[in-house]
Amino acid sequence: MTRSNIALLVLLAVVASLPLFGGAYALRLGTMACMYAILALSWNVVGGFAGYPSFATAAFFGFGAYTTGVLLGKGLPLWLGVVIAAVAALLMSAVLGAALLRLRGHYFAIASLSLVEVLRELVNNATDLTGGGMGLNIPLVSGSGVLAEAMFFFYAMWILLLLTALMVMAVAGSKLGFGLACIRQNETASSMVGLNTTLYKSIAFGLSACFVSAAGGVYAAWVHYIDPSDVFDILYSVKPIVMALMGGLGSPLGVACGAFLYLGLEEVVWRNYIQFHSGVLGLIIVLLLLFLPHGLISLRPANLWRKAKHV
Amino acid sequence: MNKSWVFRYARLAVPLWAAVVACVASNASAEDVIRFGAPLPITGPLAPEAIKQQQGYDLWAEEANKAGGISVGGKKYKVEIVYADYQSNTPRAVQATEQMITQGNVNFMFGAFGSGAAKAASTVSEKYKVPTLAATASSVQVYDQGYKYLFGTFTPNDTLTTPLTQIIKAKVPEVKKVAILARNDLFPLAIAQEMEKSAKANGFDLVYFEKYAIGTLDHSAALSQIKSLAPQWIFVTGYINDLLLVRKQMVDQEMKAPVVTMIAGPAYQEFIESGGKTAENITSASWWHPAERYDGKDIFGSTENFVKLFKAKYKSEPDYGQASAALCGALFQMAIEKAGSLDRDKVRDELARLDAVTFFGPVRFGANGQINSLDPPVFQIQGAKPVVLFPEAIKQGDLKVGVN
Amino acid sequence: MHAAQILVNAVVLGCLYACIAIGFSLVWGVLNVINLIHGSFIVLGAYLAFGLYNALHISPWYSIAVAAPLFFVLGYLLQRLLLNRVITAPVLVTLTMTFGLDLILNNAMIYFFKADYRKLTLTPSLGSVSIFDVVVPVDRLIATVAALALTGLLYLLLRRSRVGRAIVAVRLDRDAAVLMGVDVKSIYAIAFGLGAALAGCAGVLMALIFPISPLTSSGYLGKAFVVCVLGGLGSVSGALAGGLLLALVEGIGSTFFGPAHATTLSFILLIIFLILRPQGLLGRKGFE
């Protein structure tokens, strides 16, 4: 276990202590923070490790939300709905991945983006099953009090985050992670030396989908009402990328920190600039890319010093 | 060495944690002010609606404060409206509602825009037992959750389509075939489905019923197909941009029909202005109309007075969205003054018990919290003005047949 | 007759789509940047036409002449000052950069122009012409002709002028172009400026046809994406072919499966194209 992995686990443990400090609204933010971190860490598997610019996060998120939402409506318990959503997303994305991951660069980006559009429109038009544009109402899971419910969903999301983090660490330390790094550096060469790149990429795509889908499921139960334009929102694809860029591409600890920092920024900006928050967010993105292209992780004192020496 | 990396990461974590805690820290409230929370979709696809809502709330707040504020047990309280942008995104609306209640120190809530967001946000305000008035939620499903603190000023969707269908059936016997084109979105689709039921119940032949995706740029294919089916009644739902585009493309394709109905655009002044001649004889229905004449007991008094005040402030004609938002403020004021207290439960009970005439019409809430005392007007654009056809009491003219 | 009408609708709409996409395609092809500000540029162009017509009664036909240089300068500066700094970074960075810029521009438009929909209504209106029961609206017809003219101009510029040859050279082989003495940074800025100018002109034309609001920008951007992939990147005639194909698929899909499925179909077609024919209808392989 590397230092940064231990640090990540410590960070998660700190997050788990949130209910000791805050009330229901803090828990809501904590739940969002965990959700963002799940999305960002999952994206990191395919985007950071393998270097494929995937915009499919929103597709899997919406897929999970709707799968779980429909199953809950049929009377299934939440945990089962979430597990089914995760497994279904894993299978679906692995198969889709085999086809889509043959594309590279912009072409892959666009194909993954289109996946969001296609799934959204399919859900939109399956009015009988999903309610279409009228949205889907999801029965309340627990009838308990404000705080108890907030606590329940916070820990549900936190457990998912923990599982995601463990998965990402396992991948990073395994042969799969090594293979993905090879693919990122030079895919043609890796396949020439006998690496089954299609298999590796498909597994990575599948792993990046299943926890996102599960998070979508918990989210659906949490908000009680979903509609296609909300859960298939393209911002769910873009935000994890910004978070990963913020924290430092490829490093799980950096990505998780990026997710928390992003949520903090989003919340502060959203509260203080009612009319101009998305513009301010855009400004932050632009400045970040111009002045801190390698993310927070590059802010280590050692790096700054090294930079100074070069100058 | 080992200590130093722990320290390094800890240093990274501290500002993050500080940011979270800073977010959560609450701010103090001023005294002698009643705070109303209003989550609005200021950005995103519903942004045009947010402008209308805000105009309505602001007009009420201004009028209430001009009169010294709301009197509670002999003491005057100023009105303050706290806005938040939920980006046309339902979960954000829920979040904004919780943020306002737990940290914004609001006393009462206005509902989020539209049925979907209002319903989702009402789960939060119900949990905290905060009385909420939804200005723009019409679907019955919003109110069938057994909630005690949610009230709405729009009657169910079928109260719009049923009178319309009956008028058309009685006045235009040549109407046999009906075509419906609906935006695949909460309210437009719900009202189209009501129309479908209502058309079938009245023995019309439904020859076309299709949805179009949100953000559709071109309707020519759907319209050509409708044209080839030659229906006598074309019924289109959507928001104002969709309806302007559909209307323009209908003219482009030289489509004519005895009756063309559009919901919800023609209620807006912009539709008449932008549509120009092509808006003539289009029928529509909405929950309120400036031509109504009610003598209210609320702060605005008569409908005429409300229209006058609105025109003075915004230089345009109010429509049902703005009126309903202003009404929600006025209703809160009535209930609070009657309760003589800012106690949420007492105000809630007064709202439930409310039975008064307002500039918007008679207001009484059913057991589920939805208003059940209004007859929404059916109207038609005639001579660049909306003319009320129904209800009889405020009728201004007769249905004209033929949309070219 | 109905079939003929659908076909004519599709051809006219296809030219509009090409007009929307062509600047986007140029930037993507030459700079290898997916320019997410494109949609907001189009909307800004539409506001320009709207403002000029309503305030000064300048007809949109003349507004094109105003929009083209204005947007060229805007695009040129944006590229020179901001995008050129990250142009060598991976795909993800340039994409996210334009995303951030788009958030700023779009939010600014919502703030200054308000989000509600405007409509540029010409008085007197242009009406429609009909030939054997097939109706074509005149404004769309003119926009189609203008779109074709713009496309033709760009084609000529790329083929005949020195700058145009340099742009094509950079697109074909950046390194070789550098060796031949082409100032790549300035060519990038010129190409981006051209892309912006085309977007601005497209916006002026769209103002005649569609309601105007900052909220419509993502719709334009989405169409540009699909058209580019279908037609082939960076190729002028490709944008035209892609636009026509997309409009045809939407028209036929809408007629047979209902309008709600038209979008789904177009994106499924896009994915199929990406997998089977990533170079598009008219693109040549190996230009990636």
Image: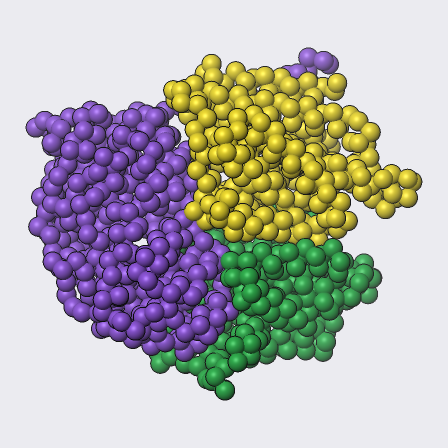
Residue farthest toward the bottom in the current orientation of the protein: C132
What quarter of the picture does the C terminus of chain A occupy?
Answer: top right
Q: Is residue B377 above or below residue A12?
A: below
Give the camera-side residue of A263 and A24.
A24
**On the picture, is B86 further left or further right than A44?**
left
**Residue B145, picture quadrant:** top left
Residue B149 visible, this orientation: yes
Q: How is the image coloured?
A: by chain
Identified at 28% across, 38% down, the residue is B110
**On the picture, is C208 further left or further right than B27?**
right
Give the camera-side residue of B311 and C226.
C226
Identified at 53% across, 80% down, the residue is C1
- Which chain is represented by yellow in the image? A
Image hue for chain C: green
Counting labels gives 0
Q: Is residue B41 above or below residue B168?
A: above
Residue farthest toward the right in the current orientation of the protein: A193
**On the picture, is A229 further left or further right than C52?**
right
**Residue B33, picture quadrant:** top left
- x and y percent of residue A245 in the render? 64, 38
- x and y percent of residue C143 in the render? 51, 76
Identified at 58% across, 71% down, the residue is C14
Identified at 75% across, 40% down, the residue is A202
Image hue for chain B: purple
What quarter of the picture does the N terminus of chain A occupy?
Answer: top right
Give the camera-side residue of A85 and B105.
A85
**Residue B141, picture quadrant:** top left
- x and y percent of residue C142 in the render? 50, 79
- x and y percent of residue A82 in the render? 58, 30
Residue B273 visible, this orientation: no
